[in-house]
Image: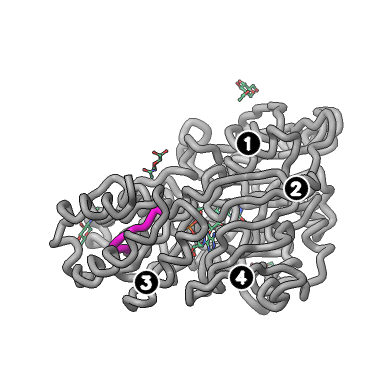
Amino acid sequence: MHAYMLFLLALGFIPVKALDKCQSQKYSDFAKSLGPILSPGASINFPGTDKFANATTRYSAYGAPDFAITVDVATEGDVDNVVQVANAHQLPFLATSGHHGATISLGRLRCGININLRALNSVRVLEDGRTALIGGGTLTIEVTEALWAHGKWTVTGICECTSLLGPGLGGGHGWNQGRYGLGLDQIVEAHLVLGDGSRIVVSEDSHADLFWGLRGAGHNFGIVTSVKYKIYDVPDGNTWVIGKYTFTEDKLEALFGLLDSFVADGAQPVELRHWVTFMRVPEIDPIHAVFVTWIVYEGTPEQASPYTSKMEALGPATTTFNTTAYPGIAVLMDMDRGALSCLENGDHVLRFPIDVRGYNLTAHRAAYTIFDEVSEAYQALSGATMLNEGYSVRAVQEVPADNTAYPDRFNNLLLSASFRVKPNATADDATGGMDMDQIAIEAGLKIRRTLFEGGESPDLYTYGAEGEV
Ligand SMILES: Cc1cc2nc3c(=O)[nH]c(=O)nc-3n(C[C@H](O)[C@H](O)[C@H](O)COP(=O)(O)OP(=O)(O)OC[C@H]3O[C@@H](n4cnc5c(N)ncnc54)[C@H](O)[C@@H]3O)c2cc1C
Ligand SMILES: *[C@@H]1O[C@H](CO)[C@@H](O)[C@H](O)[C@H]1NC(C)=O
Ligand SMILES: *[C@@H]1O[C@H](CO)[C@@H](O)[C@H](O)[C@H]1NC(C)=O
Ligand SMILES: *[C@@H]1O[C@H](CO)[C@@H](O)[C@H](O)[C@H]1NC(C)=O
Ligand SMILES: *[C@@H]1O[C@H](CO)[C@@H](O)[C@H](O)[C@H]1NC(C)=O
């Protein structure tokens, strides 16, 4: 069925009330102009439809962008047309892929047109075997699975359901970054729709200045409908060791002191990564938050043993040990499609990231104490976590700082307190029914300020959210 007919059918079902705050007539006119020029697989969707809901649910509903209408594009050329027609009708628009973006600026969009890129999810390995052409709406899991079938891999985020380019235009941290650089370092060429709806190709040889800016500040410069992206052969016999250790809070100094020795201010071996989550696990400690720690090592158990034996020597409360092929890592780390990190259920997830060079044990203890107290005091915040991500940075730091717009190649660790809160949750009577978001924000900022003051940097570096100390 042609998109225009879909649109006519949809017209009968427009919930006028929902659109009124956005001046429904403007959107009807927009849809009327756009319908006939979209490709046959595309659709225009109004609030109240499944497709609209599907395009607009988000990992975090806090400060989410507000949409009056969604366009599920089916071809790269559809994107040009949506942008041009939206401009002609003076309507704001935003492209989305994996729905995991959570910068506050996204929430400033009111009554926007959503350009849903999810149907642009293709991965084609090119003849040179060293690059792939990847659609602008492709998710991490789709990239990993498609390349794996060819014996290839690349750098993606580790969460299966973020897109390749949401992370990749602003950084792109993941398991393989120590070997190959950030996600954005893999971009060879981007097919870009500019704000006026015109289309250009951006690369080292074409609009080189824009190519520089796209890699680090990319979301601001246009909609990437596809990229030529570097890919690599998976080494023969490749295997990964995932050691999972849970530690009680008395081990904080010993644990983070050891991990800091692994980080060695950027000298961490390419094969090694660590991940620690502060969280409440009552079966292990009914009172205090614990440290769920993963050692992620590319190699055999014997090769990993210099690291895993040191973790065991610290006396974990629990130990789990697995080996897996690369695509199996996500499920062992709770970053797969079925995990909380992919859930889009209307919860607010408030995150307070900060990048640092190393673990300052004094500051880390102080940050932990704030986290532990607030997550204990409020039942509604008992699902809080704080992530400590320690990837190898070798290839990241080999790229000269001024090669791309990405501003932070020198920090070694990504830390982030994260509070999952039910919408409209309020505290119990003791606080006079205070807004839970507000309590989480105060605690999150306090944790970040503590970590910032424990570092040596005069400036705050945050990955994935606005900075505020
Ligand atoms: C649970 C979780 C796990 C995460 N894990 C990682 C990780 O491992 N590594 C990492 O580096 N980051 C990670 N992030 C942060 C992530 O990089 C950002 O949240 C990212 O913006 C998500 O992109 P998206 O496409 O999923 O989200 P969306 O909300 O769909 O998009 C986010 C932003 O990207 C823009 N965008 C998306 N696609 C395009 C495109 N094709 N062209 C132009 N602009 C585009 C959107 O317009 C929007 O501004 C994680 C975040 C969460 C919540
Ligand atoms: C959207 O639709 C796709 C395909 O039907 C489905 O796999 C996915 O789970 C849906 N997503 C949401 C958020 O509803
Ligand atoms: C990981 O190893 C544990 C034993 O340490 C085992 O119980 C579990 O099933 C393994 N998980 C997977 C996904 O293989
Ligand atoms: C939250 O509160 C606002 C304002 O009172 C209301 O409009 C909204 O429907 C509520 N959301 C939920 C999920 O209860
Ligand atoms: C660690 O943080 C504390 C504040 O918590 C600060 O006083 C101290 O100077 C920091 N140490 C280093 C080595 O930066």
User: Which residue type does callout 1 highlight?
Assistant: Glu
Q: Earlier in the sequence, mark 4 or mark 1?
A: 1
Q: Residues within 10 Å of mark 1 (few under 14, many from 20)?
A: some
Total numbered badges shown on the rendered structure: 4
Q: Quadrant of residue 292?
A: top right
Return the x and y of residue 55 as percentages of the image width and height: 37, 52
Cβ atoms at labels 1 and 2 below 8 Å apart: no
Residue that label 4 marks: 200
Q: Quadrant of residue 325?
A: top right
Return the x and y of residue 409 as percentages of the image width and height: 74, 66
Q: Secondary structure at mark 3?
A: helix
User: Which residue type does callout 4 highlight?
Assistant: Ile
| Mark drawn on residue 86 | 3
User: Which residue type does callout 2 highlight?
Assistant: Ile
> Is 276 in front, or is 313?
276
Cβ atoms at labels 3 and 1 below 8 Å apart: no
Q: Residues within 10 Å of mark 2 (few under 14, many from 20)?
A: many
* Predominant SS of the magenta segment: strand
Residue at (32%, 64%) from the top-left corner? 66
> Is 374 in front, or is 270?
270
Foreground mark, 2 or 3, reads 3
Q: Earlier in the sequence, mark 3 or mark 1?
A: 3
Query: What's the distance in space between the residues labelled 3 and 1, CA to CA?
Result: 35 Å
Residue that label 2 marks: 231
Q: Which quadrant of the render holds ligand 5?
A: bottom right
Cβ atoms at labels 2 and 3 below 8 Å apart: no
Q: Earlier in the sequence, mark 1 or mark 2?
A: 1
Query: What's the distance in space between the residues labelled 3 and 4, CA to CA?
Result: 19 Å
| Mark drawn on residue 145 | 1
Residue 425 visible: no
Residue at (47%, 48%) from the top-left corner? 119
